[in-house]
Image (cartoon, rainbow, N blue to C red):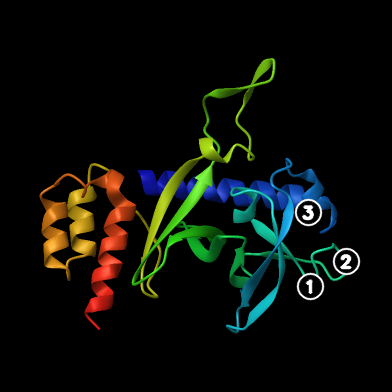
Amino acid sequence: MLRIFFILFVAFQLQSAATSFAQVSDDARFNLMTPGIREWFPGWYITLQNDTVKGYIYLSNQIDNQMLFKYATKRTPTMDEKTFEAAAVKGYLVKDRVYESVPIESTKSSSLAFARRIETGRLNLFAWYNIPNYGTMHDGGYDRPFTVNDEKFHESVFILKIGNGKPVLAPSAKDFAEVMSTVVADNKDLSNRIAQKLKGYRSGDLLNIVQQYNSWFITQR
């Protein structure tokens, strides 16, 4: 059920973004976004031919950057600015954030989106962020809904990818022990700890588990 929700949620965002962006030019569409960090940082992107192109990448916020990014050869905006969506490149780096183009599939269609890579190794961990449907925050003299700029309040869905395999949604708390112990089955000690639901090896410890697995995997070479 969570996987279906994730697919529908991402598909809705992609479709909404495409509809809005189609009504304006490439340069103007960034002006429609709620102001975020809105700064240029040294970075790079990887082409579909695996070439790395260095320059400057525009950091908007962790939600808008999942849909597209803006590139320029110089920090000061110039006429050479380019805008890329996930189908056009394999991934990019802006500041300390690495995004990778991953497939979001359903029975009727397949789309690509940028997911933020949280951990890199044999087992890659990605996060997909969204704005909570409920809740407000106090801003000056009034309460307002959360926006794309309120990053610390964003919710996230985690995605796993083993090597060059297909990205899959991380298991829910209910299925975590059974599924995750299978994912890391080649590390028997780690797999057993997860299967036994020991403290530190449950669904809330996903990042720690991925880091442990990757550290172990390096020693097996």
- Circle 1 crowding by C-alpha within 10 Å: few under 14, some 14–19, many from 20: some
SS category of the residue bearing label 3: loop
For image coordinates 26% across by 42% down, the residue present is 173
- Kind of residue at disc 1: Thr
Check whether the beta carbons of the residues at disc 1 and disc 3 lie within 8 A of each other. no
First in residue order: circle 2 vs circle 3: 3
Question: Could you say which is closer to the camera, residue 218 or residue 181?
Answer: 218
SS category of the residue bearing label 1: loop
For image coordinates 30% across by 68% down, the residue present is 214
Q: Which of the numbered marks, if any, corresponds to residue 73?
A: 1
The residue to which callout 2 is attached is 78
Check whether the beta carbons of the residues at disc 1 and disc 2 lie within 8 A of each other. yes
The answer to whether one can see residue 215 in this image is yes
Q: Is residue 12 above or below residue 81?
A: above
Q: Residue 70 placed where, x, y %?
A: 73, 62
Check whether the beta carbons of the residues at disc 2 and disc 3 lie within 8 A of each other. no
Q: Residue 9 placed where, x, y %?
A: 51, 45
